[in-house]
Amino acid sequence: MVLAVEGAKAKAVRTLPLFISDGACDDDVLLTRHWQEVETYLGDEDGVLTLDGSDVLKQGRESVGVKRQDCGAVGKRANGQAGVVVGDVNHRGYTLLDRRLSMPQEWLEEVAYARRRRKRGVPADLTFKTKPTVGGEMMAAVHQARMLRACWVTCYEAFGRDTSVLDHIDGLGLWYVAEVLHDTQVWRQYPATAVPTWSGQGRKPTRPRVLAGEAAPEEGAQLAAALPAERWGRRTIQEGSKGSLMACFVALRVSAV
């Protein structure tokens, strides 16, 4: 940014971090303008929104939201910050649409973090939300702005295994392709369900349960392993630097537990 606007001025480059951390800019206005530009140059009726986590390693204890937690950057628990990002991708290109930190609960609620919250400008009314909740809110904001043409959402298993996120995406009128864990329980045919009769003691049941005698669910991996080889087909996922990346696919309608 500095090189494009001011040129190679050392003093200007050094002050850029202060502008980013302390500058009083309206984030919503900037995002809205960005989405308008994305639609102009990348908009497509078959556009795909991507929902993903973005974790980075961090040293020390002072950066906002930093703690020892699951870190996708290294595939294990480590000291770092966790975030959620929403992107846009289609055959014309790809870009980032929105990003938010996933704030640990103790950072927002524990007295031991009060000094760090004040020092780092964490809003006093910010409440703890899970990554899927944060992602769902960002996805809704992008979709409800009605600036971007998109009909699909893709996400990896951290979001795909949360049925509330998938229900939320469906409620927005979008289609989704979501990764799930291999041990996800599924039925080949949706079982008969009913709300259990109240026994007269305790709280009245309100959620439907699978009726006795219905088939038990199967793990996704077991179901896939039982399918005959001729059901599978090889497809190209993407073109990489070492050639085409391919995988085997099968389409099968099931119902998740």
Image (cartoon, rainbow, N blue to C red):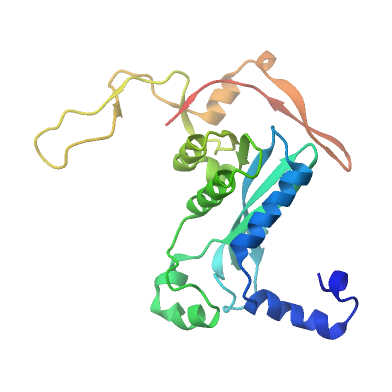
* Quarter residue 251 falls in: top right
Residue at x-position 56% and y-position 73%: 64
Question: As displayed, is residue 186 above or below residue 15?
Answer: above
Is residue 75 something one can see in this rendering? no
How many callouts does the rendering have? Answer: 0
Quadrant placement of the C terminus: top left
In this view, the residue farthest toward the left is 200
Q: Nearer the viewer, residue 191 or 170?
A: 170
Whole-percent x and y of residue 249?
68, 25
Q: Nearer the viewer, residue 12 or 155?
A: 12
Q: Visible in this render: residue 156?
A: yes
Residue 149 quadrant: top right
- Drawn side of residue 56 relative to residue 239, left or right: left
Question: Where's the N terminus, which quadrant?
Answer: bottom right
Question: Residue 128's x, y, as percent?
Answer: 44, 62
Decide which of 146, 70 is in the foreground and name it: 146
Rendered residue at 62%/35% (across/down) = 152
Is the residue 82 above or below the residue 165 in the image? Answer: below
Residue 73 in percent (x, y) is at 67, 58
